[in-house]
Image (cartoon, rainbow, N blue to C red):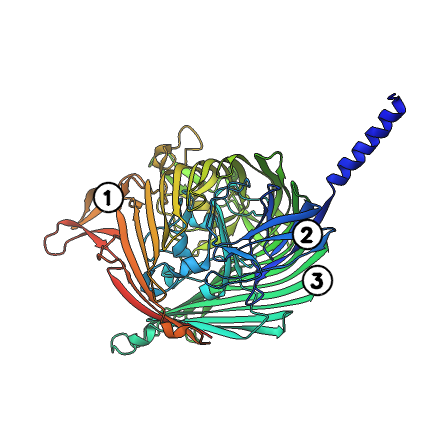
Amino acid sequence: MITKKNILLFSVLFISLSTFAQEKFTLSGIVSDIKNNETLIGVNIYFPELKIGTTTNEYGFYSISIPKGNQNINISYIGYQNVQKTISITKSSKMNFALTENGEMLNEVVITDNKGRANTRTPEMSVNKLSIAAIKKMPVVLGEVDVIKSILLLPGVTNAGEGASGFNVRGGGADQNLILLDEATIYNSSHVFGFFSVFNPDAIKDLKLYKGGIPARYGGRASSVLDIYQKDGNSKDFHMNGGIGLISSRLLAEGPLVKDRGSFLIGGRASYAHLFLKLSEDQKDNSAYFYDLNTKLSYKINDNNNIYLSGYFGRDVFAINKSFSNIYGNTTLNLRWNHLFSDKLFSNLSVIYSDYYYGLDLDFIGFNWDSGIKNYNIKYDFKHYISDNFKLNYGVNALYYNFNPGTIKPSSETSNINPDQLDRKYAFEPSLYVEAENKLSKKISVAYGVRYSMFSRIGNSTVNLYENDNPVIFNSDFQIYEKATPIGTKYYGKNKTIKSFDNFEPRFSISYQLNEDQAVKASYNRMVQYLQLVSNTSSPTPLDIWMPSDNYIKPQIADQVAIGYFKNIQDGDYSLEIESFYKKIQNRMDYIDGADLIANEAIEQVILNGRMRSYGLELMFKKNEGRLNGWISYTLSKSEQQTPGRTPEELGINYGKWYNSAYDKTHNLAITAAYNLNEKWDFGANFALQSGQPVTYPDNKYRYGDVFVPSYGLRNQNRLPLYHHLDVSATLTPRKNKGRKWQAEWVFSIYNLYNRMNAASIAFRQNEDTAVNEAVKTSIFGMVPAVSYNFKF
């Protein structure tokens, strides 16, 4: 007879058995390269029968909770062989994995090829990751491998044309991109005015471009985040690699400080094209070259503590006839401490210094000009693996800025120039964030979080005061904007607050997995940018000045929504990604007609606050498997700016109507392919086609004496001609490399194979002989063949 007591006993027993059956343990550890102990970022760790998985963080660490018993595990990473094995879980434990690059074999586990599958399991979207191996196979101008040029082949990414620095993401400005190298901010990502990037590919381990759905741990820019990490260095053996090209060479050395515990890395690049100028009598006093240095020290104190010290130093030098010289570049330094509180709680503490310097020596005038921006940053981040369905990230960050708009010094004792210091500016930007990734069911995953950012413009500074707090006035008689005359000044002592802001920046994304190979995703994020780049060019130049938000310059506030469809085809041999986005930005700076920006101490007198919007459709189709692989990306988009009048009487810019931003490219098509013919030969090709950049042409002219003066129409209502080019490369790896310590390859490339003379700009002038107005096109590159020799040992 069944009694209440028996029912209670059976219930307790059932619950106990259920609890025992669901008993879980934590598996954690590090995933690294088997040859050099280099930790690997973003490795997929998946248990197919359990339908759960995770990825390694920025330091190769993972943690996941799984049931007791024998479990099949699948570990995959692009460029490395998949590992499939069975592990026995009887308690919480640490288990490190070492992966082997494609082309080598392991015997103790099952190896399969790894494919660059579309991510259908997590809510992450609007993110592109490129392997350095893939980047090195892409043909680029002058034979130099370039990280920035490679991301221009991704959907939603463009630039201002050949020889232009920076890049534009989803219709945003180049200044709206946060560029990080080992967590340190890079303010100018280009060498030689945009021909090369500052990133040495030999020293780079991982890069990720966030175009939307940006995690709450990132802040400070309105458009995108490019997050780049340097290699740690080989802690097993000493190795060197490098390359010799037509205009530059590079060399990198890495090896153990203490076997399997500590390592060093040091790499340098230098160009020498300027040496050929010395052969010409007319050019022997001219120079144009760059050099940079990457360094990193890593040391494993014990299983729970690691320290890293990394740095970058780069300079560009441009000089003409000893009367003009220009030196600019970045310097960064970062000290990091990784600490594992438990197998579920990982932390990273970073102390970071970043400096961008711009120097100009004008001996023919008799003065030197220095400007730049420095920041000091301390950040503490935590990653909490609460369960296999719930992960929590949180942290704090504090930045201190020192802006130098310009220092003028006489270049000699005989100079008539008086020394002067434009008013330095200082700012403080603290923030804190929390973000979570939560798997709600087998099909639905969400990521959500919020960043709370604060910003204070602080003294020691003098601020202009204006009537009605208006530094720009509208002249109704002439229908133009003019500078207001200050009615006084106010001095703020050291660390006194001039103007402060604070903002909540919510982030949210969701993924619905239709099946193992298909998912739809959506995201929303708000980003706030407190720094403004003062520039009247579509592409950043070294002379551009960074300014903090203050009484007159407001922070940019960007809101973006996106929706996407992701599909793997034929078990990941092919993948398809389609995304649509809409982005609006408040307080985008615009300039009045005739604005003078260089060495302007009252920049607020030429600035109006407007707004931007951009929207579009992105498509990316990838072939991930076989001898031939690559992708096709296409973007259809619109980017516009509007600066309406502040009162009904004011005209605004372009009569207050929406007009094309300088970054608007209606069509953007890119095709990249790599073909492995055999062990000796690899081939690559890139094709790029973009709508012409918006520009302003004269639509009329008037006569002043004997001179015809052009009259320009509305801003950016015209376009440069269609931009396109085809690049090809061939890589020869001699068979004698096999089994030798010295490995080498020859890379032959042709940039712009069919010699398309793309217009970098079009100038209008009056012909001196015929007095007829004419348009003159300026092109940077025609067809450029190149060869380089790469080696390692």
Q: In this view, does 690 lie above or below 563?
A: below
- Report the amino acid beneath label 3: Asp
- Report the amino acid beneath label 1: Pro
Question: Which x, y percent locates residue 260?
Answer: 63, 70
Q: How far apart are marks 3 and 1 (CA)?
A: 67 Å
Q: Residue 303 carries which label?
A: 3
Question: Which x, y percent locates residue 27?
Answer: 68, 51
Mark 1 lies on residue: 698
Q: Which of 317 and 722 is in front in this view?
A: 722
Question: Which x, y percent locates residue 224?
Answer: 48, 47
Q: Which of marks 3 and 2 is nearer the N terminus?
A: 2
Q: Nearer the viewer, residue 562 or 639?
A: 562
Quadrant in the rendering for residue 541: bottom left
Quadrant in the rendering for residue 23: top right
Mark 2 lies on residue: 88
- Report the amino acid beneath label 2: Ser
Please tell me which residue is depicted at 34% across the width and 43% down the height of the picture. Answer: 665
Q: Earlier in the sequence, mark 3 or mark 1?
A: 3
Q: Residues within 10 Å of mark 3 (few under 14, many from 20)?
A: few
